[in-house]
Amino acid sequence: ETGVTQSPTHLIKTRGQQVTLRCSSQSGHNTVSWYQQALGQGPQFIFQYYREEENGRGNFPPRFSGLQFPNYSSELNVNALELDDSALYLCASRIGGAATEAFFGQGTRLTVV
Amino acid sequence: GEDVEQSLFLSVREGDSSVINCTYTDSSSTYLYWYKQEPGAGLQLLTYIFSNMDMKQDQRLTVLLNKKDKHLSLRIADTQTGDSAIYFCAESIGDDKIIFGKGTRLHILP
C-alpha cells in the first residue's frame, strides 16, 4: 500500500472522446508525475506537476494535459482519444522537485475502442 | 540519449538466486531504481540506490551499481514463487522524469 490512489481502475472509451483520470497523492507529497504503460512496455513519462505547475513533460502531444490541485491531488486529461491511447496510466507521487523515492498508484486501465 | 536496457525474460529454480541485469545511458542519473509489477497491478518500489553508491543490501535483495560501465543489477536470494513478476530497472533524469526499461519477466521453476 503506497498511499497513492487512482480512479477509476478501469475505463472504456470510444475513439474521439475525452477522458479524465484522477490521482490522490501520498500525504505530504507535493510532486506528482503521470506515466503511460502500453502492453508489454515499461512506463513512459507524460508530465510532472510540482506545487500546481507543470515542470516537466515527455514526448506526448498537447491533447494530453493535466492539473494539480492545492491538496496536491491531480488529474490527467486526454482529448480526442486514439486507439493507441489504450494503456495503463500510472500516477506517482514524491516529495519535492528533486529526484527522490517515487511511489506509484495501482493505475487506471484505459481501453479505447 | 536516455535509454534503459534489460533482458526480457529470466527463469530461475525456486530456492536459487535470481540476477537481473540492466544498462543505462545517462551518466547524470541521481537515483537508480528497481520496481516490481505483478499481473494487473501498479508498480511497487523494491529498492533504489544513489548514484554515488556501489552496493545496497536489503534483506534478500542486493543491488550492485557499476557507474563506469553504467550497469545495474538486482540479486534476489532464495527466490520464491511469490517473486514471480516483471522487474523494471529505472533511472531518474533531472528533477522530473524516471526512465524505465521494458521490464524483465521473472519465471520461477519448481
Image: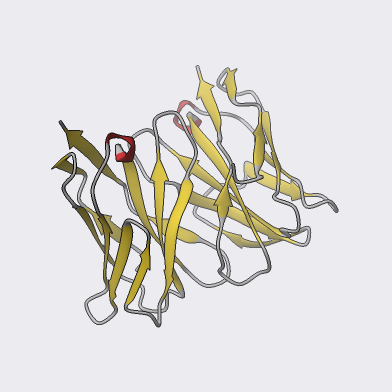
Residue B51, x across and y down, in percent: 40, 77
Residue A3, x across and y down, in percent: 66, 45
Q: Quadrant of residue A17?
A: top right
Which is nearer the eye, A12 or A17? Answer: A12
Residue B70, x across and y down, in percent: 27, 74
> Please, is residue B19 above or below residue A106 in the view?
below
**Left or right of residue A73, residue A94 in this image:** left
Quadrant, the C terminus of chain B: top left
x 28%, y 70%: residue: B64
> How is the rendered protein coloured?
secondary structure
Q: Quadrant of residue A53?
A: bottom right
Residue B20, x across and y down, in percent: 23, 55
**Left or right of residue A5, residue B54 in this image:** left
The number of callouts visible is 0
Quadrant, the N terminus of chain B: bottom left
Q: Quadrant of residue B60?
A: bottom left
Which is nearer the eye, A9 or B14? Answer: B14
x 33%, y 58%: residue: B61
x 48%, y 28%: residue: A86
**Left or right of residue B62, residue A88 in this image:** right
> Please, is residue A16 above or below residue B73 in the view?
above
